[in-house]
């Protein structure tokens, strides 16, 4: 669900592109259990690390931004998975116990 | 995502049109789909996702896609700029609705009383002809006055809107149904009207009645009209935290 009630991630991404920034987009494509944000939730990440939107309510954004920056560099789409069973959980796990999969791509 | 895709998505959103982006998450290949005009297999699957208002994976003709659904905002049309409408407008706006109030009585529908709603002083049949109810629309009739409520309900029954509700006692509602039957609607048509309106939560004040109405609308939109206590649901729930 993306309505006007949510932050305008795609509008922000378009503005950044028009300003000459490189931008990647992260999208929640799958959730298990009590994930904090529904599928379709998006985050736009700029090459300088600025971002708009949210894919987890703050739990894993830092890790997603890191991978988004790699995607901006090499142009390759990525699928990231986060959850309590993930080895990265200690660093960037979801406190709610859910799992999410995020698709990261460059806008180019 | 190609920059042209982003521009098309933003254009569709600006125009209030539903649009679905199908993306292959392995390769990044993408297609933009107009869910309500594209009759291909991909278009039909996208239409299901748009109607359900859920982004998610879909297999179409042996190929795996992720559908990102971009729906226009929800639309709530209220006939009757009455006291219950006053709390309902900000509550519905917070829940993501664009709210419009239709009431030809100019003394009721004033900006001072309804700063957050689009106001129309047309009669409901005219207002709803100018800006029709769609699949993401709800109509709530609050005036008790058949001259105002009935044309709105008639337009709603002829539309694909997802929710129709009408304020009034059982007796008022029975008389209303009788009038609408006289206008050629069947019992099956009339079963779409939630009347008396709202969930049975003992609501007394206008704000509580607004909660009962908005909760019922949400239940119809998200749970097919089913509602109840979350504690009664299976532990496997995947609802929001």
Image (spheres, rainbow, N blue to C red):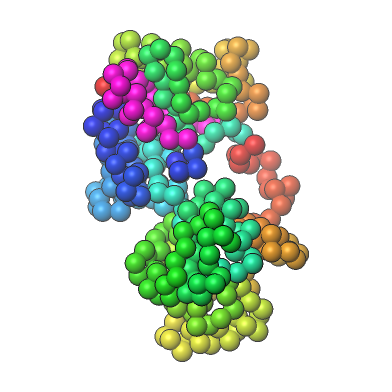
Residue at position x 73%, y 47% in the image: B231
Residue B213, visible in the rendered structure: no
Q: In the rendered view, would you say B88 is above or below B57?
A: below
Residue at position x 50%, y 72% in the image: B106
Q: In the rendered view, would you say A31 is above or below B15?
A: above
In the foreground, B130 or B155: B130
Residue at position x 34%, y 28% in the image: A15
Position of the N terminus of chain B, as image quadrant, is top left
Q: Position of residue B207 (x, y in %)?
A: 69, 59
Q: Would you say B11 lies left or right of B227 here? A: left
* Number of marks present in the image shown: 0
> In the image, is residue B41 part of the stretch drawn in magenta?
no
Position of the C terminus of chain B, as image quadrant, is top right
Snapshot quadrant of residue A103: top left
In the foreground, A12 or B133: A12
Q: In the rendered view, would you say B54 is above or below B141?
A: above
Q: Position of residue B76 (x, y in %)?
A: 49, 59
Q: Position of residue B84 (x, y in %)?
A: 64, 65
Q: Would you say A48 lies left or right of B179 here? A: left
Residue at position x 31%, y 10% in the image: A74
In the foreground, B49 or B202: B202
Range of the magenta residues?
A7-32
Judged from this view, the residue extending furthest toward the bottom is B182
Residue B51, visible in the rendered structure: yes
Q: Position of residue A53 (x, y in %)?
A: 48, 29
């Amino acid at each position: 669900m993306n309505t006007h009630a949510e932050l305008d991630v795609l509008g922000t991404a378009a503005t950044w592109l028009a300003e000459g920034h490189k931008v990647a987009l992260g999208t929640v494509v799958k959730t298990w259990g009590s994930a904090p944000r529904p599928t379709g939730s998006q985050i736009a990440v700029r090459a300088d690390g600025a971002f708009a939107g949210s894919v987890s309510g703050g739990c894993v954004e830092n890790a997603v931004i890191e991978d988004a920056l790699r995607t901006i560099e090499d142009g390759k789409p990525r699928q990231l998975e986060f959850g309590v069973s993930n080895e990265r959980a200690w660093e960037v796990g979801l406190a709610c116990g859910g799992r999410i999969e995020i698709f990261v791509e460059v806008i180019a | 995502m190609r920059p042209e895709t982003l521009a098309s998505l933003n254009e569709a959103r600006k125009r209030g049109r539903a649009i679905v982006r199908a993306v292959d998450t392995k390769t990044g290949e993408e297609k933009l789909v107009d869910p309500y005009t594209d009759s291909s297999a991909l278009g039909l699957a996208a239409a299901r996702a748009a109607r359900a208002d859920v982004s998610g994976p879909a297999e179409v003709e042996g190929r795996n896609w992720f559908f990102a659904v971009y729906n226009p905002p929800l639309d709530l049309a209220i006939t009757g700029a009455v006291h219950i409408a006053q709390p309902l407008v900000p509550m519905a706006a917070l829940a993501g609705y664009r709210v419009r109030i239709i009431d030809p009585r100019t003394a009721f529908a004033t900006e001072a009383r309804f700063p957050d709603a689009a106001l129309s002083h047309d009669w409901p049949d005219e207002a709803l002809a100018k800006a029709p109810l769609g699949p993401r629309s709800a109509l709530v009739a609050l005036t008790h006055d058949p001259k105002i409520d009935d044309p709105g309900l008639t337009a709603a029954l002829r539309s694909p809107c997802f929710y129709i509700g009408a304020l009034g006692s059982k007796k008022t509602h029975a008389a209303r149904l009788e009038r609408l039957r006289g206008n050629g609607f069947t019992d099956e048509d009339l079963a779409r009207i939630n009347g008396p309106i709202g969930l049975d939560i003992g609501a007394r004040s206008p704000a509580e009645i607004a909660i009962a109405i908005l909760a019922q609308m949400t239940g119809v939109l998200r749970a097919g009209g089913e509602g109840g206590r979350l504690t009664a649901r299976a532990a496997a729930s995947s609802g929001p935290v």
